[in-house]
Image (tube, grey):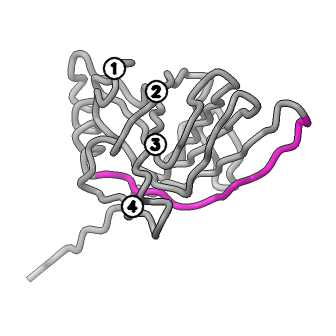
Amino acid sequence: MYQEKLNPKFKGEVTDVLINTKTGEKKVLWTSKNVVVDDFSKLIAALVKNESGYSGALYWAVGSGSDSWDDSNPPLPSVTDTKLTSETYRKAITADDMAFLDDNGNETATITNKLQIKVTFTETEANGALREFGIFGGNATSTKDSGIMINHKIHPLIYKTSDMILERTIRFTF
């Protein structure tokens, strides 16, 4: 009997860079994997069907998570997650924030199975405790917790102030 084992090949990798606006110093905080959640398949189905009112990646949401995550290891995100634990800010993703990548990780005009989204949170955006983020699409709006979650990342505390710019880059492989 033929039996096929399905292994999702969707992968996400994120890099966070913090920039001090007074000194210009850039500090790479980390490059790490993140969880692409199950609901992403629903978004793909809606896009393939040309479902009215649905679009791809629309918003990059950040959240404070839980203070208890600082005292111990934070929880791992789950593929069944559908929203952030405690969303605090949401920024629209524009077409200029996205690029296809070739096999060497370079931007290309050719459609590939690798997509990079890079968003900059300025001095006036997303200030406060940050411990998690996710990208939302489908029928997402600027309203907290709206839309279909694509991915979820929980990370160590970043306390962002008005003296900081946070550059977040995520690369998806489909």
Q: Is residue 86 left or right of residue 133?
A: left
**How many angstroms separate mark 2 from mark 3 (CA)?**
12 Å
Whichever of callouts 4 and 2 sits on the residue coming sooner in the sequence is 4
Marks 1 and 4, Cα distance to the nearest angstrom?
30 Å
User: Is residue 28 on the magenta stretch?
Assistant: yes
Magenta run includes residue 65: no
Q: Amino acid at mark 4?
A: Lys
Q: Earlier in the sequence, mark 1 or mark 4?
A: 4
Distance, label 4 to label 3, CA atoms, is 29 Å
Q: Residues within 10 Å of mark 2 (few under 14, many from 20)?
A: many
Circles 2 and 1, Cβ within 8 Å, touching? The answer is yes
For the residue carrying disc 4, how many other residues have a C-alpha within 10 Å: few (<14), some (14-19), or many (20+)? few
From the viewer's perspective, is the residue at label 1 or at label 4 nearer?
1
Q: Which residue is mark 1?
A: 143
The residue furthest bottom is 1
Q: Name the residue tied to disc 2.
A: 90
Tell me where residue 14 appears, x and y as whole percent. 58, 51
Mark 4–mark 2 CB contact (< 8 Å): no
Q: Earlier in the sequence, mark 4 or mark 3?
A: 4
Q: Which circle marks residue 9 in the picture?
A: 4
Nearer mark to the viewer, of 2 and 3: 3
First-in-chain label (3 vs 1): 3
Which residue in the structure is indicated by mark 3?
64
Q: Is residue 72 above or below residue 67?
A: below
Q: Quadrant of residue 53?
A: top left
